[in-house]
Image: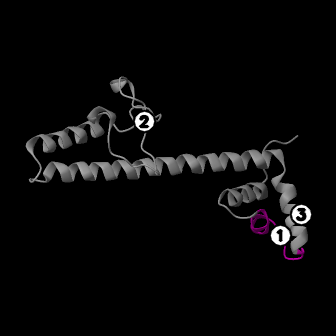
Amino acid sequence: MKSALTPKEETFSQHVALANTYADAYRIAYKTDKMSPHVVRQRAYEVADRPRVKARVRELLEKRFEESLWNDRQRAREFCLERFMLEATDMSNGDAARIRALENIARAEFVGFYGDGDGTWGTAINHAPKTSLSKSNPSCALPWTA
C-alpha cells in the first residue's frame, strides 16, 4: 500500500486542517464541476476516511495547535515584560517595587518564562512549582516572585 499522499490528498488535508468542511476541501482539491453536491459530500468523506489522509490532517492540526500555543506564550511574555517595564519606570512606586520589576525583567530575559522551552521552568529554578502562562489566565505572577 502506498503511504505518500497524492497532491490532491495533500491539498484536501491542508484545507480540512484550515477548518474547511470536507466538501469544501474536496471542491478545492478535486475537479467537481460536473458532480452533484451529494456526490461531492460522499467522495469527500471517502477521502477523509483514508488512513493516510486522517494521519496527515491530525499532523497538520497538531502543528497548528503547537503554533497557537507558541503565539499565546509570546503574547503573554510580551505583555508581562511591558507590565514589568511600566512598574520599573513608574516613579510613584517605591524603590523596592521598581527594583523587583527590574529583577523580573532580567529573569525573564536570562532565564526565560519557559525555562527549557518545554513548558517547564527549567533546571535553573527547579525548586519553583511547574506552572505556565495560559490564554485563559495570563497571570504575570512568576513562581519566584511570590
Q: Which residue is drawn at 55% across and 46% down?
A: 66
Q: Is mark 2 on a helix, strand or loop?
A: loop
Q: Residue at x 89, y 63 (%)?
A: 42
Q: How far apart are marks 3 and 2 (CA)?
A: 46 Å
Q: What residue type is labelled 2?
A: Thr
Q: Name the residue under label 3.
A: 42
**Which portion, as a residue range, is magenta?**
22-36
Above or below for 68 versus 142: below
Give the number of the mark in front: 2 or 1: 2
Give the number of the mark in front: 3 or 1: 3
At label 3, counting other C-alpha atoms closer than 10 Å, the crowd grade (few under 14, some 14-19, many 20 or more) is: some
The numbered mark, 2 or 1, whose residue comes first in the sequence reads 1
Q: Name the residue under label 2.
A: 131
- Residue 132 is labelled as none
Q: How many labels does the image show?
A: 3
Q: Nearer the viewer, residue 48 or 101?
A: 101
- Whole-percent x and y of residue 52? 79, 45
Q: Which amino acid does label 1 sit on?
A: Lys
Which of the 4 image quadrants contains residue 13?
A: bottom right
Residue 72 counted in the magenta span: no
36 vs 11, left or right, is: right
Q: Which residue is drawn at 35% across and 47% down?
A: 77
